Image (spheres, rainbow, N blue to C red):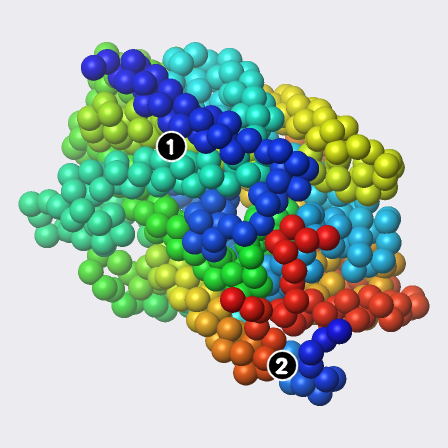
């Protein structure tokens, strides 16, 4: 049996989805947005030897991906605790 | 010490290490064989996942493809595609599948879609993706062994097949988890050490990620600017802006690799091995940290290797290297047949250019670049030996993980789950070993004429996973309304469309000469190459599944409850729990 009643379960899932959607937007923007769609525009900017679009496509997007996963894991653990659905240590 | 002797020693040492660990932790029961008895720490699991994940495609092949046939920027599809998928995995799949807590991916699909047929379809899809993936590995293994033993590619491949077989059959997942941690350490050192040396040589900066954006030693010219100049002088497209075919193609390619990552059974299965749901989330993050170390180094390796290659062959504009004075690495790779020179104008000099009529470097197999890179840069022999060991570690670890996924699909899902439920544990284990042997032989045979470079072949496998397994899993978790008919029709439609497209351009079962449409941009749908087509298959899969689900009876009550249940972490049970 689920420890949550129907409304709580809905609310938990809604908050999870909304966090997920926000992070997926960032995920999309740094890779497809900066690395492909806006590539030429960002390449006008140069940092050191890197054109910015090229940097996002080959370096920057990857760093952001790592950050996104840890942020999601942290936020979800907090959400689990708030709803009392975390697993025992 | 002589290079070949040294290579034997380093490869021998690392192999004994892996085999030693495998024997020490040799699998006892069936449960151990599949998911390592549960309870592996997320950081350890992340490291093992990284080793499992980074195959010959990432280690041996990718940087060479970025450097040469994808010509720089175009290779970004691999870099973003093979890392961004972890974000999807961590948010959309891993925690829920861990909560569900079964052995295999088809098992989840069978339960969620309350149908043995759905499970069988998932098994077939899984086998198709995994075998294609193993073909890519075999290409990498063949390249590595041919160079290392100084024999031709085919012989290298046969030797590699034999070793992969003994290696995968010897240990189960438990052996594999700890050996994979060892393999990760070997492969990451083998990848980064030469990169650091080369970055220092060229730019004076020891961090390759920064070196690629730095100026060349003793000048104020940026490395990337120099590279752009050198390649455009010879008629190639500018390195930093060379789009792979089109923006649409790059978009589709990247997306196929990303969702394929999240649909590959041998990666997903790793998330069943952590103790808790929250560990599944963070474990994906750790996996990506360990992967990112290689993936952010790879573009530096690619750029620097390309520059070194060009400048070795043509030290100054118009001043060509004489064939008689070619360096040792050049001769060694010629022996494998993967590097070929043809003196078209008969002047005894090596002219390398983008023009196929005058280009005399008639064959540079992209998959040799990473292995040849330290030799081209004249690094010490021990570094070169280490790279060989790293390449083999990468290929072996992934091949073993994939073979495990294939054999468990056959013995656990097909045999025990459907055909013979009363089968004994021993018989199940034997069946899985026979399945491994058959898979290796089949993939090895197809690896004699691979449908592309290692990373390209692996990209096809991702496309197939993207079009079949990923949508089924995602819909299974995020929609309660998808019915068994919908899921089955979706998977069948998705993988059929993708397979048809791939076979049409690459040959039926990748056998040369059986393609019925040439593999050229003019024949491609919206200019999307076969390697990038998985995303189209995925869209078809989603669309068909939703449409069919609308007109079929809703899933039964207990299935809808199960979906509710997997969305909440508490009560996930033992990592191996049934």
Side of B208 where B137 appears, left or right? right
Instruction: Say which of B268 and B145 sits in front.
Output: B268
**Left or right of A44, for residue B485:** right
Going by the image, does B440 lie left or right of B551? left
For the question of whether residue B212 can be seen, the reply is no
Picture quarter containing residue B13? top left
Q: Is residue B446 above or below residue B149?
A: below
Residue that sits furthest to the left in the current view? B218
Q: Secondary structure at mark 2?
A: helix
Q: Are marks 1 and 2 on the same chain?
A: no
Q: Give the residue drawn at x 33%, y 30%.
A: B387
Q: Nearer the viewer, residue B445 or B2?
A: B2
Chain for numbered disc 1 = B
Residue B106 position within the rendered picture, expressed as x and y whole percent measured from the top left = 74, 49
Residue A75 image offset from top left, x and y in percent: 48, 76
Q: Please, is residue B360 above or below residue B116 in the view?
A: above
Cα separation between marks 1 and 2: 45 Å
């Amino acid at each position: 049996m689920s420890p949550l009643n129907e409304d709580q379960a809905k609310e938990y899932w809604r908050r999870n989805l909304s966090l997920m959607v926000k992070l997926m937007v960032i995920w999309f923007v740094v890779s497809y947005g900066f690395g492909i769609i806006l590539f030429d525009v960002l390449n006008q900017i140069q940092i050191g030897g890197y054109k910015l679009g090229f940097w996002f496509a080959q370096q920057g997007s990857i760093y952001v991906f790592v950050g996104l996963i840890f942020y999601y894991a942290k936020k979800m653990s907090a959400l689990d605790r708030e709803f009392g659905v975390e697993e025992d240590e | 010490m002589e290079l070949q002797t040294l290579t034997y020693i380093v490869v021998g040492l690392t192999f004994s290490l892996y085999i030693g660990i495998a024997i020490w932790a040799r699998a006892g029961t069936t449960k151990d064989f599949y998911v390592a008895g549960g309870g592996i720490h997320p950081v350890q699991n992340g490291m093992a996942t990284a080793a499992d994940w980074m195959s010959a495609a990432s280690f041996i092949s990718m940087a060479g493809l970025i450097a040469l046939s994808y010509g720089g920027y175009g290779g970004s599809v691999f870099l973003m595609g093979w890392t961004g998928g972890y974000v999807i995995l961590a948010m959309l799949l891993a925690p829920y599948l861990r909560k569900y807590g079964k052995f295999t991916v088809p098992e989840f699909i069978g339960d969620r879609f309350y149908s043995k047929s759905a499970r069988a379809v998932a098994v077939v899809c899984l086998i198709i993706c995994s075998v294609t993936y193993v073909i890519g590995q075999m290409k990498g293994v063949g390249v590595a062994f041919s160079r290392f033993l100084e024999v031709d590619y085919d012989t290298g491949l046969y030797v590699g097949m034999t070793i992969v077989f003994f290696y995968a059959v010897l240990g189960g997942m438990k052996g594999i988890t700890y050996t994979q941690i060892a393999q990760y350490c070997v492969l990451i050192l083998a990848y980064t050490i030469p990169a650091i040396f080369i970055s220092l040589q060229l730019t004076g900066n020891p961090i390759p990620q920064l070196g690629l954006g730095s100026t060349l030693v003793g000048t104020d010219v940026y490395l990337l600017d120099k590279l752009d100049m050198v390649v455009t002088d010879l008629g190639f497209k500018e390195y930093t802006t060379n789009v792979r075919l089109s923006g649409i193609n790059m978009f589709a390619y990247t997306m196929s690799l990303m969702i394929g990552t999240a649909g590959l059974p041998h990666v997903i299965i790793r998330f069943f091995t952590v103790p808790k749901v929250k560990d599944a989330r963070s474990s994906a993050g750790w996996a990506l940290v360990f992967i990112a170390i290689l993936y952010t180094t790879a573009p530096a390796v690619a750029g620097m290797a390309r520059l070194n290659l060009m400048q070795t062959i043509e030290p100054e504009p118009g001043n060509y290297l004489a064939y008689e004075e070619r360096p040792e690495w050049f001769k060694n790779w010629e022996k494998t047949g993967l590097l070929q020179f043809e003196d078209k104008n008969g002047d005894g000099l090596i002219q390398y250019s983008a023009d196929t009529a005058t280009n005399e470097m008639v064959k540079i197999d992209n998959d040799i670049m990473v292995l040849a890179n330290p030799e081209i840069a004249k690094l010490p022999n021990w570094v070169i030996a280490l790279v060989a060991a790293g390449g083999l570690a990468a290929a072996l670890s992934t091949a073993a993980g994939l073979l495990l996924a294939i054999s468990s699909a056959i013995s656990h899902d097909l045999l025990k789950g459907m055909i013979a439920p009363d089968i004994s544990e021993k018989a199940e284990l034997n069946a899985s070993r026979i399945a491994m042997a058959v898979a290796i032989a089949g993939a090895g045979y197809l690896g004699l004429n691979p449908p592309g470079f290692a990373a390209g072949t692996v990209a096809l496998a991702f496309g197939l996973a993207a079009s079949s397994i990923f949508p089924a899993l995602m819909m299974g978790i995020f929609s309660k309304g998808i019915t068994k008919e919908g899921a089955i029709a979706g998977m069948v439609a998705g993988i059929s469309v993708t397979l048809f497209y791939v076979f049409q351009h690459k040959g039926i079962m990748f056998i040369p000469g059986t393609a019925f449409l040439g593999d050229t941009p003019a024949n491609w749908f919206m200019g999307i190459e076969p390697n990038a087509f998985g995303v189209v298959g995925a869209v078809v899969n989603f669309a068909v599944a939703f449409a069919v689900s609308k007109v079929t009876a809703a899933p039964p009550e207990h299935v809808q409850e199960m979906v509710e249940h997997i969305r909440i972490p508490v009560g996930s049970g033992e990592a191996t729990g049934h």
